[in-house]
Amino acid sequence: MSPDLTPPGSVRSAAEVNEQIRALWLRAGGSLSAQEREEYEMLVVEWAAAIRGRVVEAA
């Protein structure tokens, strides 16, 4: 896991997480290693949770 990932339970906006996902893809040059794939999957889960949280707030 990358040291710049926020620990579980921390709350970041979907935009912040999306920016980190974009940066990961840019660094990887479009092809993820096994470690990068793991980081990507964790970021996508965090992004989805942030989106769900935003939808609940709006409701």
Image: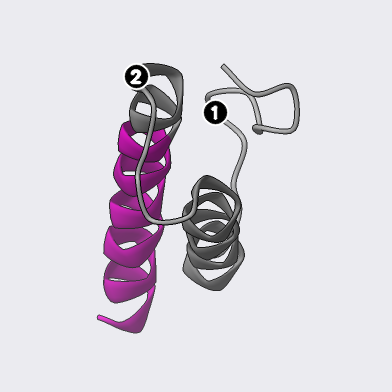
Q: What secondary structure is found at the residue carrying circle 1? A: loop
Left or right: 50 as drawn, with respect to 4? left
Query: Relative to 28, is 47 above or below?
Result: below
Residue, x 58% and y 67% (percent of image)? 19
Q: For residue 36, what is the image quadrant?
A: top left
**What residue sits right under mark 2 in the picture?**
34
Confirm whether the magenta stretch covers residue 54: yes
Q: CA distance from mark 1 to mark 2?
A: 24 Å
Drawn side of residue 2 relative to residue 4, left or right = left
Quadrant of the rendered structure where residue 7 is?
top right
Which color mode does the image show?
one colour
Q: Given the image, on which type of amino acid does mark 2 rest? A: Ala
Please identify the residue farthest to the right as the structure is shown.
Answer: 4
| Image spot of residue 6 (x, y percent) | 66, 33
Question: Which residue matches tag 1?
Answer: 9
Q: Amino acid at mark 1?
A: Gly
In depth, the one of 40 and 7 nearer the eye is: 40
Residue at horizontal 54%, vertical 50%? 24
Q: Percent position (x, y) of residue 43?
A: 42, 42
Report the residue at 38% width, 54% height from top.
Answer: 47
Among the two numbered marks 1 and 2 on one chain, the one whose residue lies closer to the N terminus = 1
Q: Which residues are magenta?
A: 40-59
